[in-house]
Image (tube, rainbow, N blue to C red):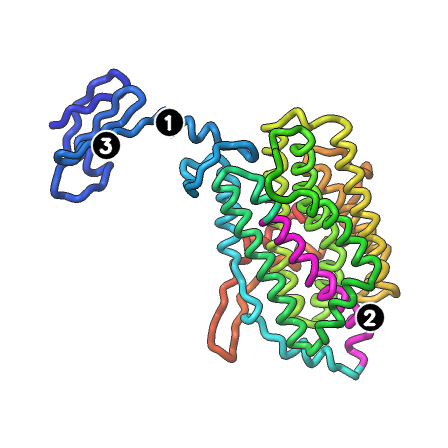
Amino acid sequence: MTYFATLGKSTNVSTDEIKSLIHFPNTHTPILESIMATTTITLGDRQFILDRDKAEAALSAKRVINGRQTMFFNMLPLKYTWAYDIYKKMKANHWEPEDIQMQKDCEHWRDTSGFISDVDRWIIKMGIGYFSAAEGIVGDNILHVIREAVTAPELKLVLGRHAQEENIHADSLVYMISSLGINPHECEAMFEDVKTIKNKTDFVVSNSRALRRDMDLTLLENKFAIAKNIFLFGQCMEGTQFYGLFGMILALYRQNKFPGIGQMFSYTLRDESNHIELLRQLFQDLVDENPEIWTESFREELRQTMAEAITLEKQFIRDCLPVAAVGLTADEFCSYIDFIGDRRLVGVALERFHRELTNPLPWLSEMMEIKKETNFFEGRVTEYRRGLDLAGVNDDDL
């Protein structure tokens, strides 16, 4: 028998019982002795003393910002378990653009029968033109602003995955352009010359550029700034301003037009739902740990930021859909943006703009259900469970 002491209480424990709990090489029998706040492990003539207080102090020192600084990427023990859960969900949803067939899309792009209208093609061009820039803007901000600001390793882990998914989305747009034979310079010209696209990107980039490395986040003004940045990119840009085009492109997909592009955008939308939730929870934990920033004036500033995001998105929608198409009007999509904007505000404990709105596009949640895709040319089956269990997603979660 081996003597085992813990917190002043003595217990006889067999060495076999200890070995069943701690797995070491069988050459020596481990002797584990826990006395108050330390754990001593003896293996032969070697002894290791582990200070539990130091480990617990390291955990309690974890914070969203201004936490314990360490050069080691040691996530354990986890404090922000929600972040690791989202990371695992993201990883399970991994997809690659090249797994999706584009043959039908190419046929539709060249269609002269009238099945595909000029407005349909314009929506696709606007989608590729806007998102080819927007995905990079989001990824850059995640890496060089938000990930640089946070200090807990598990937060850095999930934000790194977020940035990787933005790369996949950007890659999917290159795949669409090359498959359809669209001149890439035309997409760049849209980004520069379509005023509503430029206004939307300037809205977020002007904030991101001011928040680069070496910010002193002990200063109150910088705490306000990083909190606003997380809200801006998570709830306003990805959470609201992406949804007008998502709705239009998925409406085409619903009509069996451009199935490959529709499939990729449905995967992208599924990814974005994780990004929105990630930044929502990050924002809430930041506020919880820094309650001095949650002032009435700051809350109103965030609401006005969302109001501006909604206005810019409605202007953009009218450029995307200058005439009724895809079975819907610009007014219906604008109503959808009002609904989404209110959902984002409520999600971070801010007052909504409208007393009560219903989702004018309830079918959009149905488009998020991902099923098996079979690549008949290469004999592969890609299991996009990736379904994310979205069959049961509520409209309110969009």
Residue 396 seen: no
- Residue 325 on the magenta segment: no
Picture layout, residue 194 above or below residue 280: below
Mark 3 lies on a secondary structure that is: strand
Label 3, label 2: how many angstroms apart (C-alpha)? 71 Å
Residue at numbered disc 3:
48
Residue 98 sits in which quadrant?
A: bottom right
Mark 2 lies on a secondary structure that is: helix
Task: Count residues near mark 3 (Cα–Cα under 10 Å), then give few for <14, some for 14-19, many for 20+.
Answer: few
Kindly identify the amino acid type of the residue bearing the numbered disc 1.
Answer: Lys
Residue at numbered disc 1:
54
The answer to whether the residues at label 3 and label 1 have Cβ atoms under 8 Å apart is: no
Upstream in the sequence, badge 3 or badge 1? 3
First to last magenta residue range: 114-143
Instruction: Name the residue: 43% across, 43% down.
Output: 73
Residue 55: give x, y in percent of width and height: 38, 29
Label 3, label 1: how many angstroms apart (C-alpha)? 15 Å
Total labels drawn: 3
Mark in the foreground, 2 or 1: 1
Picture layout, residue 381 above or below residue 287: below
Residue 97: give x, y in percent of width and height: 57, 68
Kindly identify the amino acid type of the residue bearing the numbered disc 3.
Answer: Phe
Picture layout, residue 6 above or below residue 27: above
Which circle marks residue 139 in the picture?
Answer: none
Check the image and name the residue furthest to the right: 323
Mark 1 lies on a secondary structure that is: helix
Picture layout, residue 173 above or below residue 103: above
Residue at numbered disc 2:
119
Label 2, label 1: how many angstroms apart (C-alpha)? 63 Å
